Image: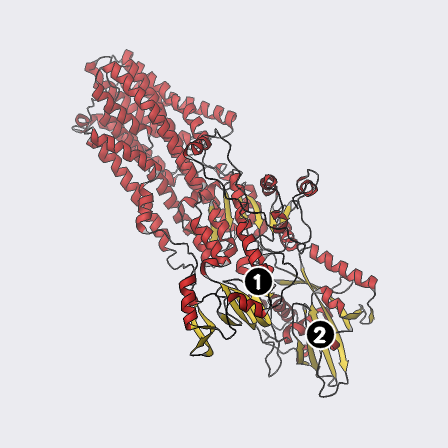
């Protein structure tokens, strides 16, 4: 793997990225090389784009370490394993337990802890814009400008408390979530020289403990199996595979992954059926699951929202650092009053900063969280709402998201691929009467048979599929099949005599049944993997009920049918029978003798069907420009079939073992091109998400298992469900009350509305404030007095900010919601530069009108001039939101929300009224405006709107975007 020929096969332009059979050998994992940390100077260069970013290596060292350790332990025989761990078969003594507890610590994994309230409050106050405003407030108080200090600090405190309140409210919704449930475990220990079983808390398990194993037990650590009897283990929380796997004491060929080691069981997996004895060889922080938690708690991840906000803050701070000193110098030279010029410059700094952004942002997020809560979505981290809107790649698991998580029988066919009642009936007898593990495939057969024969209703069949997993074949009084409520003449004519249970080597299960109609005849019914069942067969049933010899040619035909079904993503079993007659009463059935010479009847094909609404949801996501990539631990063929059925492109797919062999330089290209990743380990899922982020995508990840936790934490927005494992819920940002892509579609639209209303304020405030500063430069060079008093500028900003409080409730153009919109400093910079100077053009117009037409050109008329510019500046600034908020013509093609319109009107009314209100106008150093002022105001108002609409169309045509 990873050679030139393989590279060409994977990346060739005329071939699809694909893989060989999933059961092929696995390449050894590439060693993980931890990315080097940037120094301060290097980090600055990277941030400014002056130095190329490094490509981190793939994180594979952890899995390689575990794979090597498991391989070493798996090949040891029972006594060698006991000697390696230093434990007698009778169990550890109390003294030895105490010694090992002190040496290894308690059996507690690293947990993801919720932030304490004071940390949440601290982060609310340290929002980048709050820091900028606090710095301005500090300078204000140092210059005795108490009004500026009071207003600015009010904004900071109000915004931070709002953010804190919403974050705490979200956290309380998850107070019931705990990383692990406390569990008791049965262990074998020696007390007073006597070996005995005792129940202890899972936290008290130590390496070397001998644990008896039975159905329902959860493994308390990483365990090596010493003895077993039909032991089946569910690893679905780690692998996503819904079928249990058999575990035993013996080693086998080199496993394809750490989960396939046949005699190693991992902490948090559970026993479905069977029994055995195991020895705990690792606990606490040394277990595999703890390695996942360790990465979760130690890895500092960044998301698109935090990066975007930080860069916007830096951009505006940069403008302030450059422009404010220029304003102070020019104004100081013009007026010769350096103190007033300094105060004026400070006011300009306040004006340049969108001081309401934290509050607008948090109000937007709070409203988005409230809207999502009404649509089966709980928001755990507020910033994730914005990231949902910006998301352009959704990585999803398969089971339960694309599929029903409810395996159903799809086909029961004979050698000619025709439907066969005999295949269904015989498979039902096998599944119904076996006493061992009834897995999801058995339950599927039983429910399908009962529904087809009219023995159960559709509702009962669905209930059986969802809850019918378990042991115990029949009601022993009347042999009524499990889950059935009506007598079945066919099944009632049989009763169980003996059984050859399923085992890992034979890969089949056989039941020997008594036949009520033929007391001297026994019927052996065998069901299992196709090749293993064929191995026992000498004949094949024909459609007419006869049997023909199983020739090599016929065997190839049957294997070809199996391969075709596998290619379609179906899990395939087969069924065969044999009549055994005239046996002596004391006959003992022997699997090596009696399970041969069978007659092959046909195939059973199963599928976890796709959800009925899944294809439509994926189509909607595609229309909303969100690409869906499937990351699953399941079989490639099955995953490919499901993806194809729901409309996901499967021309480029790859499996985890093959992904490990890919060179680092080709890794990103494969991640970009592939839409399906199968047989992935948890760290591989994490690597895929990290690579997508590195490639510039805003990534969402939907998962619910322990194996998904790392990817959930790394994604820009981690999405889980309320039925997920606790560690997955802890690592996520958003919790769905229904595991459905339709719910995600709704959340995406809500996120885009939230983002749109936030970016409206940012672009409008930044461009308008930039234009005002530009006008300040012109006015400072032109006028012999300051163009606005600091208190006037502060009041103007305050009223303007009040007018924008309704933005979170504004409408958003449908066209905007079709495309993800990540935070873009480049886009904001262009918007400021192109739109900002427009307001300055009409500021110059009103300057000229007041200077030359109205004669306000001296110190004696300075207050009239300042009042005139105050009114014009605030009126145009308040109404410009209606131009910015839509790509259409405002008030003609598109209207804002009622809340925004009313808010705009009352602030505009207050603005016009202030110069005429006694005491208020005196406090603000304003004069009553004459009637001749208003023609100039009207000309500026309508001219500004007309020119902005023209520039808007040119801007969209040139740059292909608006907000």
Relative image position of residue 770 (x, y in whole percent) = 36, 25
Visible residue check, residue 467: no
Q: Earlier in the sequence, mark 1 or mark 2?
A: 1
- Total labels: the figure holds 2
Q: How is the image coloured?
A: secondary structure
**Residue that lies at the very extreme toward the bottom in this rendered image:** 585
The quarter holding residue 442 reads bottom right
Q: Nearer the viewer, residue 252 or 668?
A: 252
The quarter holding residue 586 reads bottom right
Are there few (<14), some (14-19), or many (20+) residues within 10 Å of tag 2? many
Residue under label 1: 73
Distance Cα–Cα, label 1 vs label 2: 38 Å
Secondary structure found at label 1 = helix
Q: Quadrant of the C terminus?
A: top left
Relative image position of residue 838 (x, y in whole percent) = 39, 21
Relative image position of residue 182 (x, y in whole percent) = 42, 65
Visible residue check, residue 300: yes
Which label number is shown at residue 544? none
Q: Nearer the viewer, mark 1 or mark 2?
A: 1
Mark 2 and mark 1 in contact (Cβ < 8 Å)? Answer: no
In this view, 30 is above or below 572: above
Residue under label 2: 525
**Viewed as shown, does residue 640 lie left or right of 724?**
right
Secondary structure found at label 2 = strand
Relative image position of residue 415 (x, y in whole percent) = 77, 64
**Viewed as shown, does residue 365 lie left or right of 802?**
right
In this view, 368 is above or below 821: below
Q: Nearer the viewer, residue 448 or 199?
A: 199
């Amino acid at each position: 793997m990873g050679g030139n020929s393989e590279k060409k096969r994977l990346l060739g332009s005329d071939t699809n990225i694909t893989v060989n059979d999933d059961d092929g050998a696995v390449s050894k994992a590439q060693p993980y090389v931890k990315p080097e940390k940037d120094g301060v100077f290097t980090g600055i260069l990277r941030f400014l784009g002056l130095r190329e970013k490094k490509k981190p290596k793939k994180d594979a060292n952890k899995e390689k370490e575990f794979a090597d350790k498991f391989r070493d332990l798996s090949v040891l025989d029972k006594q060698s394993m006991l000697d390696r761990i230093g434990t007698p078969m009778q169990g550890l003594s109390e003294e030895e337990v105490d010694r090992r507890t002190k040496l290894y610590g308690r059996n507690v994994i690293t947990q993801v802890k919720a932030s304490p309230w004071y940390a949440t409050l601290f982060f609310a106050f340290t929002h980048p814009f709050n820091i900028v405003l606090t710095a301005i407030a500090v300078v204000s108080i140092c210059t005795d400008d108490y009004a500026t200090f009071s207003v600015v600090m009010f904004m900071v405190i109000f915004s931070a408390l709002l953010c804190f309140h919403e974050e705490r409210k979200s956290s309380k919704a998850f107070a019931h979530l705990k990383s692990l449930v406390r569990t008791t475990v049965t262990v074998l220990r020696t007390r007073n020289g006597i070996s005995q079983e005792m129940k202890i808390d899972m936290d008290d398990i130590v390496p070397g403990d001998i644990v008896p194993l039975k159905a329902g037990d959860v493994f308390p650590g990483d365990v090596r199996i010493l003895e077993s009897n039909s032991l089946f283990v569910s690893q679905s929380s780690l692998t996503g595979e819904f079928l249990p796997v058999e575990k035993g004491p013996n080693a086998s060929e080199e496993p394809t992954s750490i989960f396939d080691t046949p005699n190693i069981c991992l902490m948090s997996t559970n026993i479905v059926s069977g029994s055995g004895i195991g020895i705990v060889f690792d606990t606490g922080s040394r277990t595999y699951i703890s390695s996942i938690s360790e990465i979760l708690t130690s890895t500092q991840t960044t998301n698109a929202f935090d990066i975007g906000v930080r860069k916007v803050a830096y951009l505006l701070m940069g403008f302030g650092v450059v422009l404010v000193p220029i304003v102070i110098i020019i104004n100081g030279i013009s007026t010769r009053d350096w103190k007033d010029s300094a105060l004026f410059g400070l006011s300009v700094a306040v004006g340049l900063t969108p001081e309401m952004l934290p509050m607008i942002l948090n109000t937007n997020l709070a409203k988005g969280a409230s809207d999502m809560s009404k649509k089966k979505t709980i928001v755990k981290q507020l910033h994730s709402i914005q990231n949902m809107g910006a998301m352009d790649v959704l990585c999803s698991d398969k089971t339960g998201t694309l599929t029903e998580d409810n395996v159903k029988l799809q086909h029961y066919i004979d050698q000619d691929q025709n439907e066969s009642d005999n295949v269904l009936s015989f498979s039902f007898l096998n599944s119904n009467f076996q006493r061992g593990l009834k897995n999801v495939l058995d339950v599927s057969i039983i429910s399908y048979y009962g529904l087809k024969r009219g023995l159960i209703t559709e509702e009962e069949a669905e209930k059986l599929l969802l809850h019918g997993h378990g042991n115990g074949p029949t009601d022993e009084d009347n042999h009524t099949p499990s889950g059935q409520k009506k007598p079945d003449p066919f099944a009632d004519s049989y009763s169980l005599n003996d059984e050859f249970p399923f085992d890992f080597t034979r890969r089949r299960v056989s039941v020997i049944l008594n036949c009520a109609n033929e007391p001297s005849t026994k019927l052996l019914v065998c069901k299992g993997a196709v090749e293993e069942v064929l191995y026992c067969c000498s004949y094949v049933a024909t459609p007419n009920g006869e049997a023909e010899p199983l020739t090599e040619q016929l065997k190839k035909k049957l294997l070809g049918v199996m391969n075709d079904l596998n290619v379609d993503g179906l899990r395939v079993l087969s069924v065969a029978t044999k009549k055994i007659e005239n046996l002596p009463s004391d006959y003992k059935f022997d699997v090596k003798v009696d399970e041969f010479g069978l007659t092959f009847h046909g195939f059973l094909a199963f599928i976890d069907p796709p959800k009925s609404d899944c294809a439509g949801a994926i189509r909607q996501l595609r229309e909303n420009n969100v690409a869906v990539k499937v990351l699953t631990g399941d079989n490639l063929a099955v995953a490919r079939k499901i993806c194809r059925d729901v409309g996901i492109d499967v021309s480029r797919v790859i499996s985890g073992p093959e992904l490990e062999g890919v060179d680092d330089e080709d890794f990103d290209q494969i991640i970009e091109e592939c839409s399906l990743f199968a047989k992935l380990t948890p760290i591989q899922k994490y690597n895929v998400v990290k690579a997508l982020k590195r490639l510039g995508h805003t990534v969402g990840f939907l998962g619910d298992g322990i194996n998904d936790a790392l990817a959930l934490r790394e994604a820009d927005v981690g999405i889980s469900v309320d039925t997920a494992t606790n560690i997955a819920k802890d690592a996520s940002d958003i919790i769905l009350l229904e595991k459905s892509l339709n719910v995600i579609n709704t959340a995406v639209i809500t996120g885009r509305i939230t983002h749109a209303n936030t970016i409206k304020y940012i672009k409008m405030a930044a461009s308008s404030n930039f234009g005002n500063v530009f006008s300040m430069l012109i006015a400072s060079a032109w006028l012999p007095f300051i163009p606005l008093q600091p208190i006037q500028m502060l009041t103007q900003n305050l009223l303007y900010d009040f007018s924008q409080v309704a933005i979170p409730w504004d409408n958003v153009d449908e066209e905007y919601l079709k495309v993800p919109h990540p935070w873009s400093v480049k886009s904001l910079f262009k918007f400021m530069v192109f739109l900002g100077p427009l307001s300055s053009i009409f500021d110059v117009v009103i300057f000229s009108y007041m200077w030359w037409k109205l004669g306000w050109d001296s110190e004696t008329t300075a207050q009239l001039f300042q009042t005139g510019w105050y009114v014009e500046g605030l009126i145009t600034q308040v109404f410009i939101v209606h131009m910015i908020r839509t790509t259409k013509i405002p008030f003609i093609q598109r209207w804002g929300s009622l809340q925004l319109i009313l808010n705009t009107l009352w602030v505009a009314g207050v603005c016009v009224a202030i110069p005429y209100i006694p005491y208020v106008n005196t406090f603000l150093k304003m004069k009553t405006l004459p009637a001749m002022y208003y023609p100039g105001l009207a000309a500026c108002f309508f001219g500004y709107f007309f020119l902005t609409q023209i520039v808007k169309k040119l801007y969209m045509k040139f740059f292909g975007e608006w907000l």
